[in-house]
C-alpha cells in the first residue's frame, strides 16, 4: 500500500484565553483536541460539522497557518509539525487554501493578473513568459474564459461565482499536491454551488489533487468526497466512506446532521425529525465524558457523562467515538 500524502496523529490546537477582572487567570479553547485522520494521494475527504466545531481550525493547523500544540502532521512522509516558518516555504508550494468568502480572500487593489502573478513571483518564477503561461493555464482550468475578458478585471467587477473561480485558480497555480477547501460554496448563490463543486471534482480527478473539503452541509459531500470525518467540539466522532456515512450513520450526532438535510419528497415533510436540543459546548470548559452527551437522546447515564469514549471500529473502515458501540 502506498504511503498516505497526509496523516495527522492526535493533533491539537488550543487557544489561550485570559479571564477575570485583572486577566491573570488563563483558560484554553480546545478547538482541535486529538484529531487523527489520513488522506491518500489523489483522494478527497470531507470534514463535516456545525459552526464552532473546530473544522476550520483543523484545516489551518494542517496548513501550519496555526501552530499546533500537540500531536503530529506528517506530509509526504515528512514530519512538519514543528518546522520553523522559514523552513516551510516548500510546504506552501505543495498546499493551497480555498477560503469561504471569495471577495474577502482577494486583494481589492489587484487585477486578476496581479492576483495570480503574486504567488509565482514569491516562489521564484522570474521569466515573464512562463508566468503568463501559468496564469493563462490556471484561468482555463477554472473556466474563466475568454481569458482576455477577465485578466484585467478587479475582484469587485466579478460575480461571486467568478470570484471563487479566481480563488481556486490562485490555489492551484503552483500545482500543489493538497488543497484545503474551507466552505467553498456556503457564500454563493444556490445556482452556482453545484458548478463550483463540479469544478473541484474535475480538478481533483484530472490533476490527481488531494482535497480536504470542510463543510457544515452533509448533502454536498457526495459530489467528490470519498471519505467523511464528522467533527464535534474538537473531536472526530465518526469516520467512514461517504456512501457508508450517508447510508448507515452510526453516531447520534451524524444522524442529527442527516436529519436537517431538506427532503425534496413532499410526502416525507410531515415525518418527525429527531434534532438534538441545545447548542455545542463551550470549549473553554467542555463537558466530561463524551462531548455530545448533554444533547444526546441515547445517553447512557454514568458512562457517557463520565468517560470519554475511544474510537470503536463498528464495521470495516467505519469508526465511531460512542459508548453505544462498546460490545466488550
Image (spheres, helix red, strand yellow):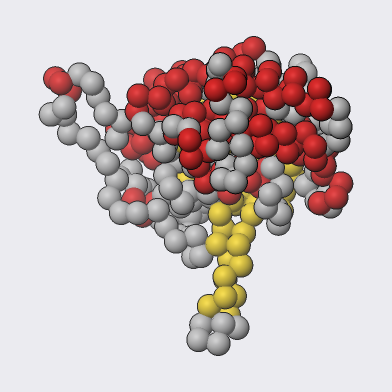
Does 139 sit left or right of 194 as displayed? Answer: right
Q: Residue at x 82, y 44 (%)?
A: 88
Point 69% across, 42% down: residue: 63
> Is residue 55 left or right of 205 when viewed as pictured?
left
Q: Residue at x 86, y 46 (%)?
A: 87
Q: Position of residue 238 (x, y in %)?
A: 50, 35
Where is residue 190? Give x, y as percent.
34, 28
Please tell me in which quadrant of the rendered image residue 120 appears. Answer: top right
Of 32 and 250, nearer the camera is: 32
Q: Quadrant of the N terminus?
A: top right
The answer to whether residue 110 of the structure is visible from this angle is yes
Tell which of 112 and 297 is nearer to you: 112
Residue at (57%, 75%) from the top-left corner? Answer: 18
- Relative image position of residue 296 (x, y in whole percent): 34, 47
Can residue 229 be seen by looking at this rendering? no
Q: How many marks?
A: 0
Is 62 located above or below residue 44 in the figure? Answer: below
> Compared with residue 228, is residue 69 higher up or lower down, i.e. above or below?
below
**Left or right: 88 with respect to 274?**
right
- Residue that extends furthest to the bottom in the rendered view of this protein: 22
Q: Nearer the viewer, residue 32 or 300?
A: 32
Q: Is residue 286 above or below residue 186?
A: below
User: Residue 274 vs residue 123: left or right?
Assistant: left
Q: Nearer the viewer, residue 17 or 65?
A: 65
Across and down, in percent, residue 50 comes to 42, 44
Amino acid at each position: 500500500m502506498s504511503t498516505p500524502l497526509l496523516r495527522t496523529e492526535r493533533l491539537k490546537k488550543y487557544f489561550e484565553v485570559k479571564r477575570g477582572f485583572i486577566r491573570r487567570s488563563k483558560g484554553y479553547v480546545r478547538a482541535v483536541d486529538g484529531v487523527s485522520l489520513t488522506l491518500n494521494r489523489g483522494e478527497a475527504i470531507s470534514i463535516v460539522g456545525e459552526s464552532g466545531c473546530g473544522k476550520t481550525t483543523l484545516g489551518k493547523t494542517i496548513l501550519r497557518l496555526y501552530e499546533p500544540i500537540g500531536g503530529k502532521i506528517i506530509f509526504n512522509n515528512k514530519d512538519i509539525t514543528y518546522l520553523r516558518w522559514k523552513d516551510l516555504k516548500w510546504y506552501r508550494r505543495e498546499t493551497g487554501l480555498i477560503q469561504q468568502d471569495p471577495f474577502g480572500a482577494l486583494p481589492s487593489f489587484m487585477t486578476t493578473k496581479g492576483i495570480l502573478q503574486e504567488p509565482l513571483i514569491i516562489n521564484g518564477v522570474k521569466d515573464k513568459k512562463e508566468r503568463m503561461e501559468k496564469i493563462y493555464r490556471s484561468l482555463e482550468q477554472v473556466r474563466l474564459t475568454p481569458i482576455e475578458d477577465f485578466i484585467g478585471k478587479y475582484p469587485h467587477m466579478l460575480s461571486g461565482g467568478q470570484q471563487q473561480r479566481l480563488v481556486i485558480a490562485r490555489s492551484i497555480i503552483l500545482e500543489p499536491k493538497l488543497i484545503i477547501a474551507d466552505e467553498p460554496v456556503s457564500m454563493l448563490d444556490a445556482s452556482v454551488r453545484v458548478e463550483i463543486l463540479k469544478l473541484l471534482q474535475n480538478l481533483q480527478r484530472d490533476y490527481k489533487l488531494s482535497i480536504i473539503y470542510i463543510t457544515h452541509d452533509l448533502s454536498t459531500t457526495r459530489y467528490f468526497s470519498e471519505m467523511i470525518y464528522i467533527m464535534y467540539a474538537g473531536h472526530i466522532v465518526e469516520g467512514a466512506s461517504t456512501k457508508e456515512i450517508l447510508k448507515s450513520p452510526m453516531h447520534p450526532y451524524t444522524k442529527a446532521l442527516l436529519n436537517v438535510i431538506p427532503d425534496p419528497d413532499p410526502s416525507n415533510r410531515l415525518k418527525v425529525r429527531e434534532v438534538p436540543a441545545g447548542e455545542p459546548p463551550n470549549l473553554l470548559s467542555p463537558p466530561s465524558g463524551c462531548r455530545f452527551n448533554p444533547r444526546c437522546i441515547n445517553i447512557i447515564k454514568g458512562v457517557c457523562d463520565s468517560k470519554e469514549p475511544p474510537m470503536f471500529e463498528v464495521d470495516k473502515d467505519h469508526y465511531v467515538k460512542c459508548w453505544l458501540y462498546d460490545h466488550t
